[in-house]
Image (cartoon, rainbow, N blue to C red):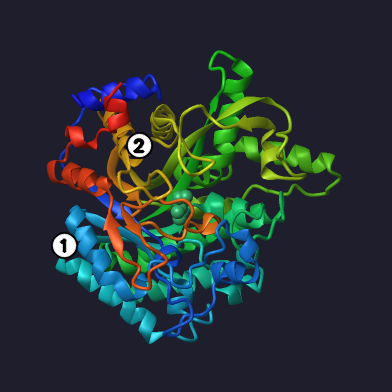
Amino acid sequence: MASWAIIGLLAVCHASYITAYTKFPEGFTFGVATAAHQIEGAWNVSGKSENVWDRLSHTRPEMIADGTNGDIACDSYNRYREDVEELAHLGVDFYRFSLSWSRILPTGFIDELNPDGVRYYNDLLDALAEHNIEPLVTLFHWDLPQSLQDLGGWANPKMIDYFRDYADVCFKQFGDKIKSWITFNEPYEICEDAYGDEKKAPAVDSHGVGNYLCSDTLLKAHAEAYHLYNETYRPVQNGKIMISINSIWYEPSDPENAEQVALAEVANQFKFGWFAHPIFTEEGGYPAVMVENIARQSASEGLNKPRLEQFDDYWIERIKGTSDFLGINHYTTHLITGAGVDPIAKSPSWLKDIGAVTTMNVGGDSASEWLRVVPTGFANLLRWCKSSYNDPPIYITENGFSDRGTLQDYGRIQYFNEYLSVILNVIYDDGVRVLGYTAWTLMDNFEWRAGFSERFGFYYVDITHPDRPRTPKLSVDYYRQLIANRELPQDERFKDPAVRRL
Ligand code: NOJ
């Protein structure tokens, strides 16, 4: 029993959640994740071209909370060997990182392959191999070449071809060293936050329109990359390929309120189902409730066509089943308080299309406004995925906690302990097939519009120092011990003294 964890949990009243399990099943794997733009730096050297985050942070620095950018970030382009040493110290089974499209193909197209970019990733892959660390590689983690954004980015259907071409280059160049691929990281964030809002670059903010154009393109691009891998590369490279879908999980604020319960399901279909339903259900296509709600809203707006239309039969079939695992990024749970138009919803918009009012949950705070500690929500999400998507094999491809950068990061340790306990519970009690876990993130890095003000890392990074020195936080010891023993650590020193005193 993780007795201290339980006492700690009860003491801080995060949740009435208790686990009986501490030991992970045989074969369960552990990793950590990063993303190219968040760590690499070297934004305009060795042949790399501008991406949408370079453009946003340079031309609209006021959009980044602390005015920073990814120009140098953690300087991993030059310091990747240190990164690999840290990974080896943690003892991870795998390292999830992403490839920078604009570093590999500076024009965005396949007419120009950047030898330095290819060399960099080969060197990183070789360093990982020296330490027996498996790569889990994301093709697209938000850093679109600006040249392609100039053509409309993910709202442009030609992106299906451009992404397939880029994927082809990556499979060809690196596929002999990579057995696990992720096509897209968090399609919701790519489409809703960047094309339906200004929360992410390129900040197009075509709410209720651009976000849905994006999802059509992105899901087709994903399917094409999958089929390419499946037919051409898998027979010789023997790898796996999946997509990582993000969920802020929605729950009714009053579980006894039938309307809220129904609306929470609608919200989860809009959030997670938007990208999961077309790929992971037998029926395929966008969730019916999305199609219906958006058609109704569009008609009431005087449009002659819905802003989101169901895929035709060809694409329903083509997209269905195109992921070997369900990759889940999960951080937190929000609440539904009732029907209506959320006061923060723009018109038209994805949020207005849901037709529910959302709010933050009760739960421990992090440094990120959107992130509260709600482990029970994670358990419900995982059980829902099992029942909604025919018991898929699942990898948690991200999960983590932000603070302001303290080295004694008890909040992070407690978060990991609680969320990992949930995983054990759903594996053993509910038979959810979670096969591996990825902690976000190796080191403090460029947290998009939050810059370096919200820190998710195991290692603290001093971004005022030219060498970007990395200092281990207490959570390094926690995760290292966890991985070494394949068991939730029992050690008293991982428990927050403030809680211990209670
Ligand atoms: C999800 C994203 O994939 C990652 O880039 C980001 O840093 C974390 N969430 C934390 O917000």
Q: Looking at numbered disc 2 in the image, what kind of residue is underneath it? A: Tyr
Q: Position of residue 424 (x, y in %)?
A: 26, 31
Dots 2, 1 in contact, CB < 8 A: no
Disc number placed over residue 132 in the picture, else none = 1
Q: Quadrant of the C terminus?
A: top left
Which sits earlier in the primary sequence, circle 2 or circle 1?
A: 1
Q: Residues within 10 Å of mark 2 (few under 14, many from 20)?
A: many
Which quadrant holds residue 483? top left
138, above or below 433, in the image? below
Residue under the point 24% across and 49% down: 476
Q: Looking at numbered disc 1 in the image, what kind of residue is underneath it? A: Asn
Q: Nearer the viewer, residue 347 or 468?
A: 468
Separation of marks 2 and 1 at Cα, in angstroms: 28 Å
Residue with the mark numbered 2: 415
Q: Position of residue 129 (x, y in %)?
A: 18, 67
Residue under the point 16% across and 62% down: 132
Q: Nearer the viewer, residue 378 or 235?
A: 378
Q: Position of residue 467 (x, y in %)?
A: 33, 72
SS type, badge 1 = loop
Closer to viewer: mark 2 or mark 1: 2
Q: Position of residue 176 (x, y in %)?
A: 25, 71
267, above or below 99, in the image? above
Q: Nearer the viewer, residue 348 or 172?
A: 348
User: Is residue 71 visible in this depiction of the protein?
Assistant: yes
SS type, badge 2 = helix
Please give left or right for residue 462 compared with residue 214 in the image: left
